[in-house]
Image: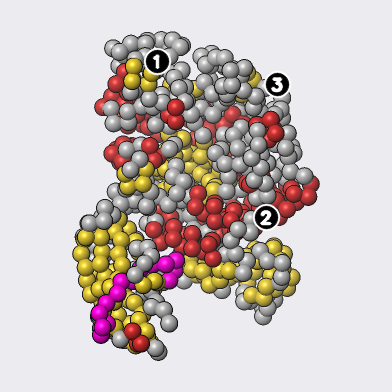
Amino acid sequence: MRILYDSKLPQYKTPFGVLTPGEPCTLRIHVPEAVCAKRVDCLVSREDGSPAFAFSLDPESRDGPYRIFRGDFTLEERGLYFYYFIVHHNEGSFRLFKQGNDTNMEAGDLWMLNCVPAEYDTPDWAQGAVIYQVFPDRFAKSGSPDLTGKLTPYTVHKDWNEEVTWQPEEDGTVLNNDFFGGNFRGITEKLDYIASLGVTILYLNPISKSFSSHRYDTGDYKTPDPMLGTEEDFSELCAQAHARGIRVVLDGVYSHTGSNSLYFNRYGTFPGQGAYQSQSSPYYSWYTFYQWPGNYHSWWNFDTLPTVNKLDPGFLRFIITGEDSVVAHWLRLGADGFRLDVADELPGEFIQALRARIRQIKPDALLMGEVWEDASTKIAYGTRRRYFTDAQLDSVMNYPFRNAILDFMRGRDSGRGFRDTVMSIVENYPPQVMRCCMNLLGTHDTPRILTALVDDFEGTRAEKAHRHLSRNRLEVARDRLYMASFLQFTLPGAPSIYYGDEAGMEGYRDPFNRRTFPWGREDEELQAHFRLLGALRRDCEPLRLGDIQFFQAGDKHLGYTRSRNGKTVRIYVNRSEDPWAIDSGKLILGRNIQLASPTATILAPRGFCILEE
């Protein structure tokens, strides 16, 4: 018999998940009577490994062959803590560690405790939202923009449906300077379509004046790219989105600028003197030069992306604290928040100052971070990040959920790994953050989800440009996407649709995941499915904001509940090739149901459903 302790279950730890300073917490550990345990100690350490405190768990009751030991404690300071147990018995003692969801004597991992500020809040409108991510040049266009001031050279595709330019230049460089003309007015004209998907947040990849079509090489932070339109066009987009109950979140790119920018000005394109031109430039201190002007610190050694010194006083004033700072400028034009590009590369002080400033201007503004791992335990550049313990971010991009869904759908996991990943994130994240997490299947940085569900091809750009899913593989991918998106929309957080995924777009990584939206050639069945999911999120509070508990995970079956305010729905997913007899209930939504009645429900192979208790 094993010693029983699972921090995710209420019979062992209450409350579930994170704590706040001074909040009472109770631990219970179930020890077999045969161990003859007299006392159990819990040893708690800080995130740096130094001892914090210890406390005892004393005998409380019995449950069959187990003796239950209970201990109570509080954490007085916010931070990340780790703990393990020492079990004292008649002949000595032994240590007890974590091994998966079980315990293990003398070897294993530590359990974790996350203590966050009691006043930590996130915007109500972002909790349980549905997000739609748009790559602005490739979504929709309207009219012909005034290209005065557009950074050159660039090319504009004559046909919206042409292939993206993927061929490098003769010297091997990839310029990413081909455009299709997507713009603010185009997005505005498609807001009714976006709203029809149940979307409540529109997230735009960078919109500032830049050389490239991806616009992560900022040229002028406060000026929209001429290809997109004017400040007035952007404000009208925000106003029209707000009228439909949709908030607008912008990409904040503050780790680096473009070399072809007002601030660096390597090519003399902009008026005035940039850091590359003069050491007397007001922007010189923004950058790190090893040997001025040609040898400088750049993002991942791309010399077109010189890295900035984020805590430089001038840069902080310009981006955050100044009266007309960059964040103030865009919020006043209508934006509702920011997604921080490469948040791991931004100092905690920078992120905290930014969040405080946007909340000062717009008290319910959202700050989301690009983090690819568990953000509660993230270590970047040798430093443990304090995104939650210092209340720096309201939300993060939830790549762990994406990985768990892909592993389950691709047969790399029978369901247990999915449950463990989901519950680990839910346990480690503050609930108000968890409800805002961007639960994505695809982004501008990943292959299209249809492709990712069936094809791991790693080849040259030329091969990827000409490789498409066969009819048979496309049908398999579509079938899997129905289930994958169902999982995405029934988990805690804010499901995010990357433009065109709902229309059946396919493609490998950049630039093939950034093709134009296939207007007039959409997969209408998939679109209808996503509309159903969006409506379900809107109308079902437990799915939008409820707690989650698993009752089945394994053998290619998943079962979990979402509960809120006394209402509970049950979610079932059958990835196996055999029918699954499940509990009866009121059918809210389902696919591949063999039999549904008040007394019996049979879920067919590759079927899924939601039942109301």
The residue lying furthest to the bottom in this view is 64
Side of 66 where 195 appears, left or right: right
Q: CA distance from mark 2 to mark 1?
A: 50 Å
Taking the image as shown, residue 45 lies to the left or right of residue 537, namely: left
User: What's the CA distance linking mark 3 and mark 1?
Assistant: 37 Å
Question: Image height check: is 12 above or below 247?
Answer: below
Residue at image mark 3: 158
Ranked by sequence position, the earlier of labels 2 and 1 is 1
In percent of width and height, residue 165 lies at 65, 25
Image point (68%, 49%), residue name? 454
Q: Is residue 495 visible?
A: no
Q: Quadrant of residue 140?
A: top right
Q: Is residue 307 visible?
A: yes
Mark 2 residue type: Arg
Q: What residue sits 44% from the left and 36% below the top?
A: 341
Q: Which residue is mark 2?
A: 480
Q: Is residue 137 above or below residue 405?
A: above
Q: Mark 3: which secondary structure? A: loop
Name the foreground residue: 125 vs 81.
81
Amino acid type shown at disc 1? Gly
